[in-house]
Amino acid sequence: MTHKIIAAFLSLTLGLVGTLASAQGLFSPAIKVNDSAVTNYELDQRIKFLQFINQLGDLETRARNDLVDDRLKAQAAAELGITVGADQLAAGLEEFAGRANLKADEVINLMAQAQIDRQTFEDFVRNGLLWREVVQLRFRGRVQISDEEVDAALGAGGQAGLQVLLSEIVIPLNNQNQAQVQDLASRISNLTTQAAFEDAARRFSAAGTRANGGRMQWLPINRLPPALQPVVVEMRPGEISDPVPLGNAVAVFLMRGIDELPAPSPKFAAIEYGILRIPGGRSDAALAQAQSIRDRVDTCDDLYAINKGGPDEALTITAAQPGDIPRSVSLELAKLDRHEVSTALTSPDGSQLYFLMLCGRTAAVNEEVSREDVLNALRNRRLASYADGYLDQLRSEAVIVEQ
């Protein structure tokens, strides 16, 4: 009996030692950043957090890099005496949760189900708030945007002078696939590289640009749908947008470049376009018919002859203000010059192929583009540039040791 008691005691003792050793390893340093350590536990938590927000790719490498950056940002904030109060943190948590139309408590409960601690969520948000304050304090005074710079970006006479280089992924949406499409678009919006975005475009996009990874040509920003312009003008090169609803599709955009136009580009009061609806959706027969029509038409007026004898509702020639045009149509028109054609769209139920032709654009006269939008875009781009450079400097000066 005595031997059995001793054996049981030794078994229990060895089990506790093993558990303590495992816990000790979990909380041992994975990375040292100057005098601060990132533990294996924090690394494991950040990986789970990235999975929770639908990040793709090499999550361990991403987590390591992010945690190193977080330490550097926190150290920079401490040197400047910057802290985040409880109310500020609570507002930050709500702001983050609000992006998914949730409350902070709801996000915390969902994270708990994924074995993510509340502290991990709070640390992520706190570091973002700290860095925002660091950037504002260090660089806000340097960002002085002159009236001349705003004028140059706008162009003469209040005409838009910005052009953008975008890549696109457009995913058709209907009542049956709404949840799946929203989830896919959310995952795409969390991609972190152009290569990953282009791979997703080839796999999932229905746009005509899918074959070349979704890459569009340079476009004057005022050609884009009006609701999309403020979203795009705030993006930095390399940034991927949140999902953008287009009516019967959802789009995600990658910003590859933004620049000033060498010459002013007019804002448009009206856009005239024609849609010829071809039965069969994206079937081979419908696409072949569209190609045959493309070979026979030079202007929108030619579409009337093509539809002669057919149902009147099959052809519409419309002149509308840019803001009144459906977003999916407006986005396709943005890629077209006068009398050019797109066959990238279908009717909402997919039963008809849209033969879309741009008839022409009518320039607006004396219509003011928002100077405030352009001013904010220029200021944010410059602040972002300063912030990226400062973080690179902090990294180069830091002692970073991988354990």
Image (tube, rainbow, N blue to C red):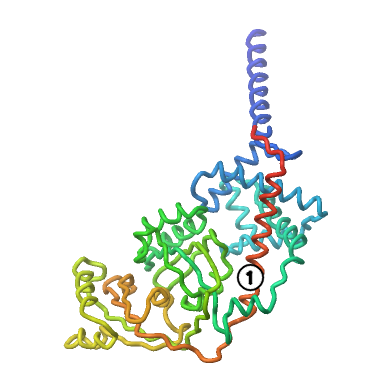
Residue at 53%, 58% in the rendered image? 238
In which quarter of the view is residue 345 placed? bottom left
Residue at 53%, 69% in the rendered image? 232
In which quarter of the view is residue 147 placed? bottom right
Farthest left residue in view = 309
Residue at 39%, 72% in the rendered image? 248
Viewer-closest of 273 and 2:
273
Which quarter of the figure is the C terminus placed in?
top right
- Residue 393 x %, y %: 69, 49
- Residue 69 x %, y %: 66, 48
Which residue corresponds to mark 1? 378
| 207 shown above or below 80 | below
| 182 shown above or below 395 | below
In which quarter of the view is residue 176 placed? bottom left
Which quarter of the figure is the N terminus placed in?
top right
How many numbered callouts? 1
Mark 1 residue crowding within 10 angstroms, few (<14) / some (14–19) / many (20+): many
In the image: residue 309, left or right of residue 78: left
- The kind of residue on which mark 1 rests is Leu
